[in-house]
Amino acid sequence: MELRDYQKDIVRRGVDIIADHRLLYLQMEVRTGKTLTSLSICEELGASNVLFITKKKAITSIKDDYDKFGFSFDITIINNESLHKVDGDFDILVSDEHHRNGSFPKPNKSTKLIKQRWSTLPMIFLSGTPNAESYSQVYHQYWVSLNSPFKQLNFYKWAKEFVNVTERNFGYANVKDYSNADYNKIKPYIDKHIITYTQSEAGFESNVNEHILWCDIKESTHNIINTLKKDKIVVGKAGAIIADTSVKMKNKIHQLCSGSCILEDGSVVILDTSKAEYIRDKFKGQKIGLFYKFKGELDILKQVFGDTLCTTLDDFNGSDKNIALQIISGREGISLREADALVYYNIDFSAISYFQSKDRMTTMERKNNDVYWIFARKGIESKIYKSVTNKKDYTLRMFKRDYL
């Protein structure tokens, strides 16, 4: 196995950036080879022990790449949630899907831990979508390193210089909004650390063909939704569905349209398997990747698909089984190139989930990727889809406009 020419060029440039600044951000689009490129940079730098932080579902594929290329350094591949278990000394840190460290105004738990334990190491950040939601995500992504171009500023001092801070009224209080950062001001500080590369530059010619399929769900499911909207409570044999706030109403309707619901006591009830049965029959004979949103939906898929369904990439790649992945955990860092099609059992409120997850089948060789959205007639999913395809999260305000 060998790197492509553009990857070799990025490796050469990346080695120089690490040598000069000890901090490199590879902003490479999905399927352009961020993982192999970053590992090759570590090899060229003469690293002996690398810490590679990624998502749990991506660990296996990264280990496969490491083994196939026969790199000479040792590697520890770990997910963010298990960082506290890491022991040993490292020469360099690679942070995959690094945009996850971009929360603001406060850093999240794993971001704090990276800063606390490994801030002195040379670092390579990887992401195809580094600032998908707000340019204010820039600050804490660099903050984890002592070589951050903003190391003299805490977030609030940084915001005074780079963010148009406004106030939003939430009814109970006015809260400062730090999301409107000015990228034109930020760019000169971070450009020296960044290498960007797109699928188009790499020679990808694949198209993502999206199809919307409408499914009839049970009339009893529509009745529950209508009663819930009217009375804010539905009581059945299994327990109570309560939607006494707009947030609860939004989530309950979202769940019900795909056949499951979390009851007031925290248990999950399966009410309607119509969607799963429709998918099973529609895609019979095909090997598909399924994305679901809620835990109860996985229970439905297991019930309907039985032994033809798996939940790990190893099983999926080594068999004729279909795979079911939760949207958020499966939207990054994995390849579903073995799938004939991607099928969305449900849809997430997040625009970033939409754009990242639907590209999981893309490869250099594949010219067409078919993505299918299964929407309940008269359901909430089509309204969410309209929002996220326009790069906007489906918010509570939108839900109130559509339903209340």
Image (tube, grey):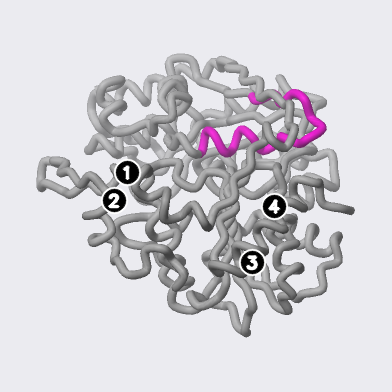
Give the secondary structure at mark 1. loop
Task: Measure the alpha-carbon separation of dots 2 and 3.
Answer: 31 Å
Residue position marked by numbered label 2 in the rendering: 162
Disc nearer the start of the sequence (2/3)? 3
Task: Measure the alpha-carbon separation of dots 3 and 4.
Answer: 19 Å
Kind of residue at badge 1: Asp
Mark 3 or mark 4, which is nearer to you?
Answer: 4
Kind of residue at badge 2: Phe
Residue 10: assigned label: 4
Residue 64: assigned label: none
Kind of residue at badge 4: Ile
Disc nearer the start of the sequence (3/4)? 4
Residue position marked by numbered label 3 in the rendering: 52
Estimate the x, y position of residue 127 in percent, counting from the top left. Answer: 56, 50
Estimate the x, y position of residue 61 in percent, counting from the top left. Answer: 74, 55
Whether 49 is drawn above or below 283: the answer is: below
The residue at the far right in this view is 1
Residue 182: assigned label: 1
Q: Residue at x 56, y 15 (%)?
A: 214
Estimate the x, y position of residue 223 in percent, counting from the top left. Answer: 38, 20
Marks 3,4: beta carbons within 8 A: no
Give the secondary structure at mark 2. helix
Whether 375 is drawn above or below 180: the answer is: above
Whether 65 is drawn above or below 163: the answer is: below
**Local crowd size for mark 3, using a 10 Å CA cut-off: few (<14), some (14–19), many (≥20):** many
Give the secondary structure at mark 3. strand
Marks 1,2: beta carbons within 8 A: yes
